[in-house]
Amino acid sequence: MLLDVGDAVESLGGRYGTGPDVGTGPADMVTVGERTRWAFCRPAEHGGSGDSSGPTAEGVLAAIGALCAHRFGSADVAGLRVTLIGLGNVGTHLAKALSSAGATLTVTDVDPGRRALADAVGATWVAPDEAATAPGDLLVPAALGGLLSPDVVPLLRCAAVAGPANNQLTGEHVAAMLHERACSGCPTRW
Ligand SMILES: NC(=O)c1ccc[n+]([C@@H]2O[C@H](COP(=O)([O-])OP(=O)(O)OC[C@H]3O[C@@H](n4cnc5c(N)ncnc54)[C@H](O)[C@@H]3O)[C@@H](O)[C@H]2O)c1
């Protein structure tokens, strides 16, 4: 299957390059790269830049800092109550960094094996279907996309959302709902 992906990417003649995402990693890009040179983040020993989740987490932390400065008056997350959904590659970096920075963490993952990380960083574990609407200052989606829908937005009990998950909104109209919510009395801290 990965070789077929490589063929498909190569057929685009460089107009699209691929890399690891949910369910794939740098080693898979070696296989994809057998059929195309447009496969990124291969392991360093294969001439690539390796796992992208660390740099992705750095970018997310910068975005969280900017958001917190805007919403809460300080980029410092110390003392903020943060709910983190997804303790995979990026989420693990975020959990450790946010915990070290003094945030109070609530976390979840559909993989119960990730609970050990929750314990290691002193986080409170909640069930996956309870996390998005758990009370807290900041919600960090770090699992799959499509978390924020017209059904979920009215139930949110957070004052800000920032995270790495791709396509967090189910549609552009959800952005308008979030904006309206922020303008109509949503608390600055929850
Ligand atoms: N890895 C990167 O460099 C990178 C870059 C940009 C964006 N992203 C995006 O960030 C998100 C996380 O990527 P990743 O590389 O950490 O993936 P990952 O596969 O390593 O981790 C995803 C985690 O989410 C968990 N999960 C899946 N569905 C869930 C649910 N409904 N509730 C709670 N947990 C759930 C999985 O069990 C897994 O632990 C994805 O949306 C990805 O597209 C990743």
Image (spheres, grey):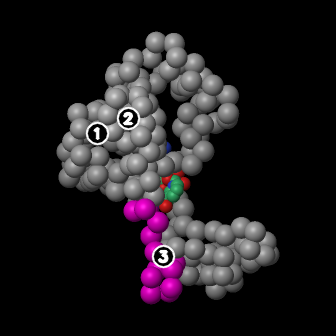
The reply to whether discs 1 and 2 touch (Cβ–Cβ < 8 Å) is yes
Residue bounds of the magenta highlight: 42-55
Q: Write the residue at 43% across / 36% down.
A: 67
Q: Secondary structure at mark 2?
A: helix
Q: Is residue 63 above or below residue 19?
A: above
Q: Which mark is residue 29?
A: none
Tag 3: Cα neighbours inside 10 Å, few (<14), some, or many (≥20)?
A: few
Q: Is residue 177 above or below residue 169?
A: above
Tag 2: Cα neighbours inside 10 Å, few (<14), some, or many (≥20)?
A: many
Marks counted in the figure total: 3
Which amino acid type is marked by label 2?
Cys
Earlier along the polypeptide chain: callout 2 or callout 3?
3
Q: Secondary structure at mark 1?
A: loop
Task: Give the labeled residue for mark 3.
Answer: 49
Give the distance between the C-alpha atoms of the residues marked 1 and 2, in whole angstroms: 7 Å
Earlier along the polypeptide chain: callout 3 or callout 1?
3
Task: Give the labeled residue for mark 2.
Answer: 68
Give the distance between the C-alpha atoms of the residues marked 3 and 1, in whole angstroms: 30 Å
The C terminus: image quadrant: top left
Q: Does residue 45 appear to the left or right of 28 in the view shown? A: left
Q: Is 54 a magenta residue?
A: yes
Q: Write the residue at 41% across / 28% down.
A: 71
Q: Which mark is residue 76?
A: 1
Which amino acid type is marked by label 1?
Asp
Tag 1: Cα neighbours inside 10 Å, few (<14), some, or many (≥20)?
A: some
Specify whether tag 2 is near ligand 1 (CB below 8 Å).
no
Give the distance between the C-alpha atoms of the residues marked 2 and 3, in whole angstroms: 30 Å
